[in-house]
Image (tube, rainbow, N blue to C red):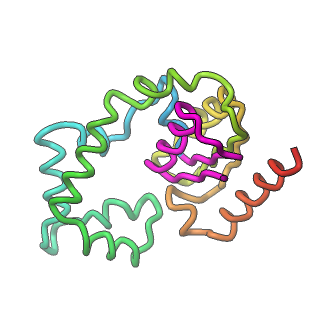
Amino acid sequence: MDLVGHDWGAHLAMRVVSAYDVPVRSWVSDVAHGWHPGYRWHEAAVLFQQSPQGEELLASLRADSPDSPSFGDFLRPRGMSAELATEVDAVHDEVMSAAVLALYRSARPRLHADWGREFGGPAPAPGLVLVPTGDPMAQPALDHEVAARLGARTEELDGLTHYWMLQDPDRGAEALERFWAACASA
């Protein structure tokens, strides 16, 4: 199988490839910088990891008032479309907030501290690290370093943000297809 993950799914894909004997033909991640030993969580993640600040932030994003930003508003600067942001807002409840907090708090101090040390050399299968350079939280230099350490290819998605697959699905698909074609010919 060709394993592709985005955001937390990308972290989990990298974990599967690094720690388990799962037969994959290839893997793709778009947030490999989180596996760098020098990575520091972005400001929102730091808040999510703290109590009561995380609870307070997410409660404020659930508030239904015209003066209060929503969770969708919080995600839009990273490239989420207005339509999808509206869908996120419709389902953002206390259960979702609790899941967000539990997820971020489970990954302290950072992914490298728990998982990354075990993924210090070339991956057992070919990898591709996608680097959306327009993501305000992107760290392309760290993405490239992690990819080099793992023997993975990189492809920069210039101008695209965290939600690259929504912004330009054709460009994302072309990057994946090029990578898979190279895997097939290797």
Horizontal side of residue 184 vs 123, given as left or right: right
Image coordinates of residue 128 in percent, x first then y, are: 68, 45
160 lies above or below 183: below
Judge from the rendering whether residue 111 lies leftward or rightward of residue 56; answer left or right. right
Quadrant hosting residue 142: top right
Taking 3 as reference, is 107 above or below it?
A: above
Q: Nearer the viewer, residue 121 or 141?
A: 121
Residue shown at 53% from the left, 36% from the top: 33
Point 30% across, 41% down: residue: 104
Classify the position of the C terminus by image quarter: top right
Residue drawn at (58%, 46%), measured in percent from left and top?
A: 29
Tell me if 56 is positioned left or right of 147 in this view: left
- Magenta region, residue range: 1-30
| Image coords of residue 50 (percent x, y) | 19, 37
* Front one among 134 and 85: 85
> Is residue 17 part of the magenta span, yes or no?
yes
Q: How many marks?
A: 0
Residue furthest right in the image? 185
Please tell me whether residue 140 is drawn above or below residue 112 in the rendered image: below
Q: Give the residue displayed 27% in from the left and 71% down from the top.
A: 89
| Whole-percent x, y for residue 81 in the image | 44, 72
Q: Is 22 in the magenta?
A: yes
Is residue 112 rendered to the left or right of residue 4? left
Please determine whether, in this image, residue 104 is positioned above or below residue 77: above
